[in-house]
Image (spheres, rainbow, N blue to C red):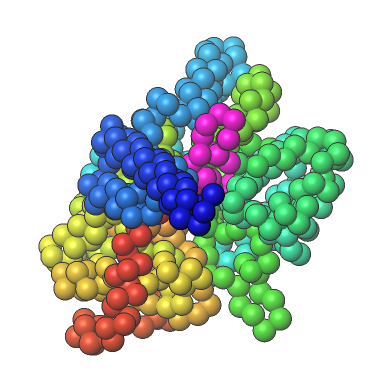
Amino acid sequence: MNVLAYEAVGETAFWQMLSLSSILHLAAFVWVAQHLIRHRRDPVSMMLWIMVAWTLPFFGFVLYLTFGINRVAAKSWKKESANRRFLDERTSREAAELPLSYWHSIRAAVAHEPAAPVARAIDRVVAAEVTDHPLLGGNRIDLLIDGDEAFPRMMAAIESARNHIHLQSFIIGNDVVGKALMDRLAAKAREGVRVRVLYDRFGSTFAVLGGLFYRYRNVPNLHIAGWSMARLFKKQFPVNLRNHRKVLIVDGVTGFTGGINLQAKNITREKQSPIRDYHVALAGPIVSELQYTFLRDWYYITDEDPDHLLCAEHFPRLEPQGSAAIRMINGGPATELDEICDTLFACLVSAQKQILAVTPYFIPTSDIIRGLRHAALRGVDVRVVVPQKNNHVYAGWAGRAYYDELLESGVRVYERRPPFMHAKGLLIDDEVAMIGTANLDVRSLKLNYETNLLVYDDGFINRLKAVMLDELARSHEIDLNLWRQRPLGQRMKENASSMLTPIL
């Protein structure tokens, strides 16, 4: 065969391969487009995904499978089915003479309505949305600042355990804090205390790869499980969905939750300040709501027998411990799709005097932006505090892309000086506080599993306000005129980063 013949054969093979690639690319693009149309979502997000699928052959398709399919109808989620089954199991145990009969009665007995007018207006709206978690009175809630305050209280509670310890965290560090925690839990398990630990596989990547959890695999009474929504063999690919809750319940009577992860960065070290963060310690009927939230997640991951989970030992008789009325607000992409978003929106549109918000990541939904702007235009004093230096640079850039429209409407934006601020808090008119694990960003509001608390208690609100005013005092306020003079390159970085928010 001569050279021309070889060239002809090679050219034919090239065009055949190119044709096959084009057909596969077109098929992948059509699949993404039809999936987006069948599962309606934000139009901007849809158009962005269509552009990604078309301009990035094959890679765009993989990106969509990995990050795009995150809002599947609730009925298709295994988590939703598990939640419903667990609720049925709980309901069957709430009848008289059965293990959870006391929990059923106490929820009705301490049901509460706020006295302050704005608080009452907010809670009436929230009550219609959050039907599974009533507003419960008779609670004590203590604000804990940074790991320096939170960890000693948590460790003391763990040491006092006699029946069980339930721990859940987004990050458990493979460091001095994570190791000390796991050692303490293992010691309690060897004493006969039943210990369950649930960590997020993405957030705790370094602990997983470093073998931290593997070391405790044979400790009796210590059960460790990792949270992941991605299951290859079940054709579930949403690695973008994570469990961001941080929860500790000891003997069903003491609870902790908030923003603090279990890692060394959260405590004072030599010449290093801890990450700025908020946590709360809880006592009273609200602890049973926190317990149920943990057990529901645990059941989804482990399929442990409900008889072992929904038992009287996990839901003991809880006498009133204080004056705080608290409602639990859970969030997640399956069963509690919009509870946190709707609660935030109700707070913003109901405010009459002041809104104070602290968040590490400020990439809000359009509704939250509109709520903040509308409040400021009504004359409400709206102040938002974010970190000056973010631990995720692109998140800081994306958040700054929203400053202009907020400042223009009268919202006051502050950037807190280091150390990095990971705290999340919201105060409305000195009558309502929201605190917990959710940030004011798309990930927390649309993708993550989160737990927030809506708190009505003057003492707690005054304490939280003092702390938030301290954040303001350590911050630099953004001036609209100076902000608009920032360099073009900075604006381009911010706007480019904000373009990614529909697919976060």
- 374 vs 57, nearest the viewer: 57
Does 263 appear in magenta? Answer: no
Q: Is residue 403 visible?
A: yes
Residue 304 location in percent, x, y?
67, 25
- 377 vs 56, nearest the viewer: 56
Residue sticking out furthest to the front: 2
How many numbered callouts?
0
Name above or below for residue 289 compared with residue 88. Answer: below
- 219 vs 152, nearest the viewer: 219
- Residue at 78%, 39% (x, y): give it: 222
Q: Quadrant of residue 69?
A: top left
Name above or below for residue 286 compared with residue 429. Answer: above
Q: In the image, is 180 to the left or to the right of 32?
A: right
- Name the quadrant of the C terminus: bottom left
Q: Is residue 155 visible?
A: no
Residue 493 location in percent, x, y?
34, 75
Q: Which residues are magenta?
A: 228-247
Residue 12 location in percent, x, y?
42, 47
Does 233 appear in magenta? Answer: yes
- Residue at 65%, 54% (x, y): give it: 205
Q: Quadrant of residue 295?
A: top right
Name above or below for residue 472 compared with residue 181. Answer: below
- Residue at 51%, 20% (x, y): give it: 85
Name above or below for residue 169 compared with residue 403. Answer: above
- 188 vs 371, nearest the viewer: 371
Main structural element of the magenta stretch: helix, strand or loop?
Answer: loop
- Residue at 76%, 57% (x, y): give it: 210
Residue 241 location in percent, x, y?
48, 45
